[in-house]
Image (cartoon, helix red, strand yellow):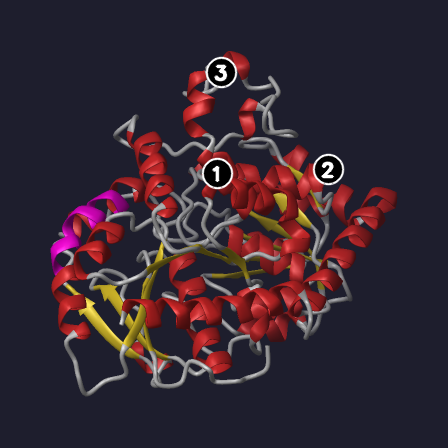
Amino acid sequence: MEEKHEGKGHRLILMPTPFQGHITPLLQLAQILHTKAGFSITIIHTIFNSPDPSSYPHFTFHPIADGLSETETATLDALHLTDLINIRCRHPLKDCLATLLSQVDQDPVACFIVDAALYCTQGVCDEVQLPRLVLRTGGASSFLVFASFPQLREKGYLPIQESRLEEPVVDLPPLKVKDLPEFHSLHPELFYEFVCRVIEECKKSSGVIWNTFEELESSALAKLGQEFLIPIYPIGPFHKYFLAGSNSTSLLTPDKSCISWLDTQEHKSVVYVSFGSIVAISEGEFLEIAWGLANSKQPFLWVVRPGIIRGSEWLEPLPSGFLENSGGRGCIVKWAPQEQVLKHPAIGAFWTHCGWNSTLESVCEGVPMICSPCFGDQKVNAKYVSDVWKVGVQLQNKPGRGEIEKTISKLMLGDEANEIRGNILKLKEKANVCLSEGGSSYCFLDRLVSEILSLKSSAS
């Protein structure tokens, strides 16, 4: 849609779950609704992992007390932490919303848009009589699997059993049991209970917004539309509405020196390696990755986030002289400006954990993927990348250096590599078309803006 500014004179309140992969799409959505439709934007956020207001001077930011201790926020159990946030933020959120709704000198509030993981917010919105729209920051295909959890448990697929890993999940082709989402938590039942609660509260909302596009996930979106009986709005890819890096959403500072290193590399020769903002690996896994990259003889840009190696600060386990001995083929940074990296002509493949943001960004730039999923929706995303869209290959869990070397060669050279590259370039074109006038995401955004304005009129 053009910048019609129908939303001018109306305010939206949005709230992210405080993790990088959730903050980024929510702030992108806020920016879309502000620039394309003219809504004024208020962001409610926890003190933990709070976004930087200086990156968005045109938004209003309201921190709320989350009651989290340093010990609690330092945990590697992101699921337990998200559950705590739902419990601790309910009352501070209600107080904050009540204050914002009573501000007569501000634009009237049309609705509250919140990350699906903050399931507690539906009850709060009901109490303050504010319409609630949900943002699903992951893909539709993985959400369809989450929505099927009760049936999967009933049929014995959940909890996942080692002996059944290769068994097909009959109602969810092409998934096998090993592709089903899991989350290793200190509280074994928490993942199942959490997912069911999120789905239940989503169904009570006024609609779900998706950072995906119809041509990528048409089947899953159609099934969810039938099951949820509420409007769904696939208006992604969010990041393609803007120039790369136009507003920073990163909690870590990207090292932009890697772009000048990429400038010295040959076209489509570099393997970009990044496992996101939460994944942690052992020292043994780290060393196998290092030697697999070195032995592949391909140039590589490797994001090694401080703390990603359990028990190490940063690169201490790396053998002395590793980068020097690789003949200058490697560049290691603590964090990278990923959108810029994936756009760079030197990038030939992306070795990723298959978080949804990374998967979508790779599709949009036509970069084939090597998939190493770890938890949550990543295994479903990886299965779709390798077996449905056929735009990448999967590495099995904790691969050795030999398998890593072989997989890199498979994706960078030969007939299969050309086929995969052709497939992802077709998807890239579809991602571009869906945002142009008359495209699927363009039309769904128009519908979303109309729905928000009707919610406001019915609530007033």
Identified at 53% across, 41% down, the residue is 226
| CA neighbours of label 1 inside 10 A, class few (<14), some (14 to 19), many (20+) | many
The residue that disc 2 covers is 406
Q: Tell me which segment is drawn in magenta.
A: 82-92
Distance Cα–Cα, label 2 vs label 3: 26 Å
**Mostly what secondary structure, the magenta segment?**
helix
Q: Amino acid at mark 1?
A: Cys
* Left or right: where 165 falls relative to 42: right
Place residue 178 in its image quadrant. Answer: top right
Please indicate, yes or no, whether residue 328 appears anywhere in the rendered image.
no
Q: How many marks?
A: 3
Q: Quadrant of the N terminus?
A: bottom right
- Of the residues tagged 1 and 2, which is closer to the observer? 1
The residue that disc 1 covers is 374
- Of the residues tagged 2 and 3, which is closer to the observer? 3
Contact, mark 1 vs mark 2 (Cβ under 8 Å): no
Q: Find numbered disc 1 in the image and state the secondary structure of the residue it sits on.
A: loop
Q: Position of residue 88 (x, y in %)?
A: 15, 50
Q: Amino acid at mark 2?
A: Lys
